[in-house]
Amino acid sequence: MNYDAKADSKSNLQETAEERRARIYPVILSEYNPEWPKWFEEWFSLYEKLFKNKCE
């Protein structure tokens, strides 16, 4: 089991929803990657195939 000291530093009752989201889903900034448009097209194509009939 992975122990998260930050999570234990505050009681769950005192932690706001915003603080919890920030802890669980941190925002990670990085430099622009020229591969991103290609990755988007690949993922978009995959999702389009998967959900083709469900979105019409």
Image: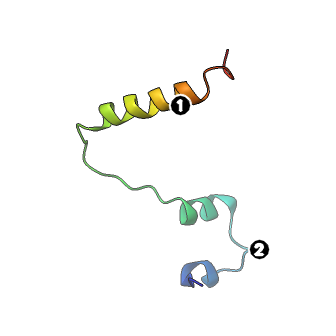
Residue 38 x/y as whole percent: 31, 32
Which quadrant would residue 42 be assigned to in this image? Answer: top left
Horizontal side, residue 40 vs residue 16: left or right: left
Please state which of residues 48 and 18 is positioned toward the viewer in this rendering.
Answer: 48
Q: Which mark is residue 47?
A: 1
Which residue: 61% across, 84% down? 9
Identity of the amino acid at label 2? Leu
Pointers 1 and 2 in contact (C-beta within 8 Å): no
Residue 8 x/y as whole percent: 63, 83
Residue 49 x/y as whole percent: 54, 26
Few, some or many C-alpha atoms within 10 Å of disc 2 (few <14, some 14-19, many ≥20)?
A: few
Q: Quadrant of the C terminus?
A: top right
Q: With respect to residue 3, does 21 lie above or below?
A: above
Horizontal side, residue 26 vs residue 39: left or right: right
Please state which of residues 50 and 16 is positioned toward the viewer in this rendering.
Answer: 50
* Disc number lying in front (1 or 2): 1
Few, some or many C-alpha atoms within 10 Å of disc 1 (few <14, some 14-19, many ≥20)?
A: few
Residue sticking out furthest to the top: 56
Please state which of residues 10 and 31 is positioned toward the viewer in this rendering.
Answer: 31
Going from N to C along the chain, the mark reached first, 1 or 2, is: 2
Which residue: 35% across, 36% down? 39
Which quadrant would residue 34 be assigned to in this image? Answer: top left
